[in-house]
Amino acid sequence: MALLTIDQLTSVVTLALEKAGASPSAAAATAHALVAADAQGLASHGVSRVPQYTTFLRNGRTSTTAVPKITNSRGGACLIDAQSGMAYEACGLAIKTATARAREFGISCVGITNSNHFGAAAVHLRPLAEAGLVGLAFSNSPAAMPAWGGKTPLFGTNPIAAIFPRRGGESLVIDLALSEAARGKIMLAAKDGKPIPLGWAVDKDGKPTTDAKAALAGSMLPVGGVKGAMIALTVELLAIALTGSAFGFEADSFFSDEGNQPRLGQLFLAIDPGALAGSDVYFDRIETLLGMMLADEGVRLPGERRHGLATKAAQHGIEIPDALHAQIVELASRAS
């Protein structure tokens, strides 16, 4: 394993993205988010994505000239066009805009259209909590799950996240995808020739399967059965119908180098507690609930592990596989 400081890893990732054609601002925003994900123990959404992102930049699946901009606006709501570029710069603009409008109007809703893979959802929400705002994030992704009762993949794993600031404590962070299991786990099982648990996926005929390869040719199943499927549908509508983006079935898989520009959608909500019962009441109510949760032995607050890992990473650095490190270094040294 290669051990790098956060600054060292951010620097080499930024350079690799720039060499692939990303603008300095897009590369910096992306590197910051990917390294933050790795620091929090979310390696699947961290710098392991750099080879994929650079390939997409080089083959046109991601625009190298995109500059996100606000295209529609009214009161606390607005729409940002990511112009098929990397999602992270657009998300940064969305959070900055959502913060300002929530402070002015009490609540804000910022959508992003023509976007791309946006990594770990909760990473984007951290600045909202630092501003004392409650934040929520929704995104769709390329089709992986069927509508309930069906067998054709229509919805993505459609991540959702929420962050709740606290008075004198680390924010409460909730972040999850809506599939029963991560697709990456099924891909690993298929590679190793191992079975998967029943309930993770169905085959191309819609039948439950423990065969990982059959699962990859079929569909993921939603967490919580029909209830998870309905949440996935809700996220698809929030992130797409409101933003005019591409549905999951209209976006080619991220697991293929070739394909279309995905044109995904994201939606961020920011709420100022002071506009409702008031910040003091909000903070008191949060601590009352968390106190009751922690009084029950064995309960761990959502986001607690991530914060601990991020603190450790800031002090001691981040370990990544040697092969991945070598690949990123090679990408950073390529001719533009």
Image (tube, rainbow, N blue to C red):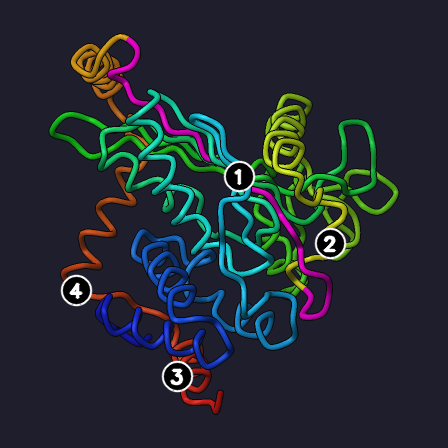
> Circle 2 sits in a helix, a strand or a loop, which is it?
helix
Disc 2 marks which residue? 216
> What amino acid type is highlighted by mark number 1?
Leu
Disc 4 marks which residue? 316
Q: Sequence order check: which comes first, mark 3 or mark 1?
A: 1
The magenta span reads 256-276
Q: Sequence order check: which comes first, mark 3 or mark 4?
A: 4
Image coords of residue 329 (percent x, y): 39, 83
Q: Sequence order check: which comes first, mark 2 or mark 3?
A: 2
Mark drawn on residue 329: 3
275 within the magenta span: yes
Image coords of residue 56 (percent x, y): 60, 70
User: What residue is shown at x 84% (from left), y 47% (from top)?
Assistant: 204
Q: Which of the two discs, 3 and 4, sits closer to the camera?
A: 3
> What amino acid type is highlighted by mark number 4?
His
Determine whether, in the image, residue 195 is placed left or right of residue 182: right
Q: CA distance from mark 1 to mark 2?
A: 35 Å
Q: Which of the two discs, 1 and 4, sits closer to the camera?
A: 1
Image coords of residue 229 (percent x, y): 67, 28
Mark drawn on residue 155: none
Q: Sequence order check: which comes first, mark 1 or mark 4?
A: 1
Q: Neighbour class for label 1 at 10 Å: few (<14), some, many (≥20)?
A: many
> Circle 4 sits in a helix, a strand or a loop, which is it?
helix
> What amino acid type is highlighted by mark number 2?
Leu
User: What residue is shown at x 22% (from left), y 37% (from top)?
Assistant: 130
Disc 1 marks which residue? 79
